[in-house]
Image (spheres, rainbow, N blue to C red):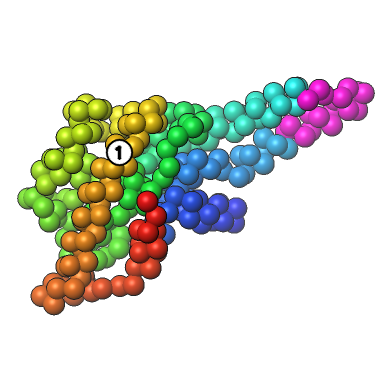
Amino acid sequence: MLLQRLQRRLAIRVIRGYRTTSAEAACVVSGSIPWELLAEARASMYQRRIALRQQGITPTPSAVKAERHQSRQLAIEKWKGRLANPRAGHRAVGAIQPILEDWLDRRHGRLTFRLVQVLTGYGCFGEYLHEKARREPTTECHYCDADRDTAQHTLEVCPAWAGQRRVLVDKIGIDLFLPVVVKAMTGNREMWRIMVSFCEVVISQKEAAEREREDDPSSAPVRRRRRGARRRAFARFP
């Protein structure tokens, strides 16, 4: 548990996520294989190497490299099986788990504060602000008549962002279910750029509107302004 807590804290910093982000979501988004699985794999590799040396066999550098790769793949397979039934972070985990190997091995794609909000569902959304952050009196969307303003609602449905969404639809297709989007952006650098652009434009506008509601003296008391140092700090990053 101690290892998991430490890794969760580090992974949240890596992805620039909210402190409430679960260990499963933070690790899978950051691509951080659970340390205990890596430790198990490395321990098995060490024991095999000791056994070979006792037989007078010295592994070649290429054999050692291949064994390290195999050890990592074994850890990933165990992790993927564990992620099939996550305890939390279902949105991000459900989208990334089917293509976990591709997500880990991709050569492109930087994570931004606002992209991570859409991937995890933890951010400037009525559902999160009401149920987790306790900063909204309801889960309603401020831009349409939807009862629940979620990350998926923002990405796929809300008419307020139809213009920004058009580029996504043109490139990815009409199906903006998160696993579909994640698969597309993982396999294509341009798709990733388009998704990041959408998140930056839309979420920044939602954040600005949220700050206005915080400053409005007629707003519900639950919307009182808080420091939000973490959000302001990460908002500086592109």
Residue bearing the label numbered 1: 195
Left or right of residue 29, residue 62 in this image? right
Q: Is residue 4 above or below residue 64?
A: below
Q: Is residue 171 above or below residue 231?
A: above
Look at the image and say whether residue 24 sits in the magenta stretch: no
Percent of width and height locating residue 168:
23, 33
Name the residue located 71 percent from the left edge and 26 percent from the top edge.
Answer: 65
Look at the image and say whether residue 55 sits in the magenta stretch: yes
Q: Is residue 61 visible?
A: yes
Q: Give the dominant element type of the magenta stretch: helix, strand or loop.
A: helix
Dot 1: few (<14), some (14–19), or many (≥20) neighbours within 10 Å?
many
Looking at the image, the residue that sits furthest to the left is: 145
Percent of width and height locating residue 26:
45, 48
Percent of width and height locating residue 153:
19, 44
Q: Which residues are magenta?
A: 44-61
Name the residue located 34 percent from the left edge and 68 percent from the top edge.
Answer: 228
Q: Amino acid at mark 1?
A: Met
Tell me the quarter of the picture where residue 19 sits: bottom left
